[in-house]
Amino acid sequence: MHSTLVRIQNVFGFFTTVAFFVAGLVALSSLLYPANVSVDVIKANGVKIVKGRAHQYYTSKVQEYAVLNFDLEADLSSLFNWNTKQVFAYVSATYPGSKYANNEAVIWDAILPSRSASKLILKNERAKYSINDITGKFAGRDNVTLSFHWNVQPHVGRLTWGVVGLTEGVKFPEVERAGKKAAAK
C-alpha cells in the first residue's frame, strides 16, 4: 500500500503542522499579558569629561570621553510571563552634537533572565561604557538626557520594545585634568 518512507513523511508533516499551530497559539497568548513597567527614578548624578586614547588602537589620537553616573529604580516584573525568555534592559544617553543634531549612546545594559532579577535599584551607578563623539570633543555641550529602554525576547513570537524616563538635560562639564586634581588636594 504505502511505503515506510511515505508514512514517515506523513507523520513528520502532521507533527510540524501541529507544532507550528501550537507555537502560533503561544505567541498570540502572550498578547493577553499587558506590560506595565514602572520607572520611579532615572537621573544623571554626575558627568565627567576625561581625555584618553581608544584601547583598541595604540596610535589613535587623544580625544575626550564622557563618563556618567546615574540612579535608576525600575520594576520590569510585568514583562515576564510564561513566554518570556529574557529581557534586555539598557540606559542610553542622548546629546546634541556639532556634526549631527542628535546622538545616542548606550551607557549601561543588562540581561534579565527571570522575574527575580527584574527589580532594578541602582544608586550612583557608574556607566559601563564611556561615550566618545565623532568629533572627539564634548566639553561645554548642553542637554544630555538619559532614557531607559527594554526589549522582551520571547520563546516564540515577536520582540517587543519599550522606552521610559527621559530626564532633564545635564550639561557636559569642562575637561578634567590631572593638574586640577593635584592642585585641589
Image (cartoon, rainbow, N blue to C red):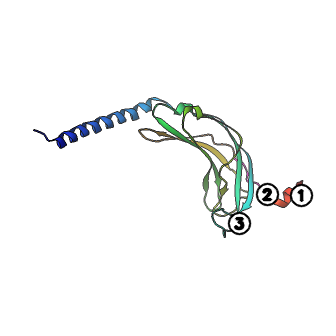
Looking at the picture, tell me which residue is in the foreground, 122 or 167. Answer: 122
**Which residue in the structure is indicated by mark 3?**
62
- Please give the name of the residue rendered at 18% of the width and 43% of the height, measured from the top-left corner: 5
SS under mark 3: loop
Dot 2 amino acid type? Glu
Q: Is residue 171 covered in magenta? A: yes
Which structural element holds mark 2?
loop
Q: Is residue 64 magenta?
A: no
Q: Are marks 2 and 3 in contact (CB under 8 Å)?
A: no
Q: Can you see residue 102?
A: yes
Q: Nearer the viewer, residue 78 or 4?
A: 4
Q: Mostly what secondary structure, the magenta segment? A: loop
Res 176 label: 2
Q: Which region is colored magenta?
A: 169-175
Q: Residue at x 76, y 54 (%)?
A: 173
Q: Which is more N-terminal, label 2 or label 1?
A: 2
Residue found 66% across the figure and 58% down from its top? 132
Q: Which residue is mark 1?
A: 183
Q: Amino acid at mark 3?
A: Val
Q: Position of residue 168 (x, y in %)?
A: 69, 44
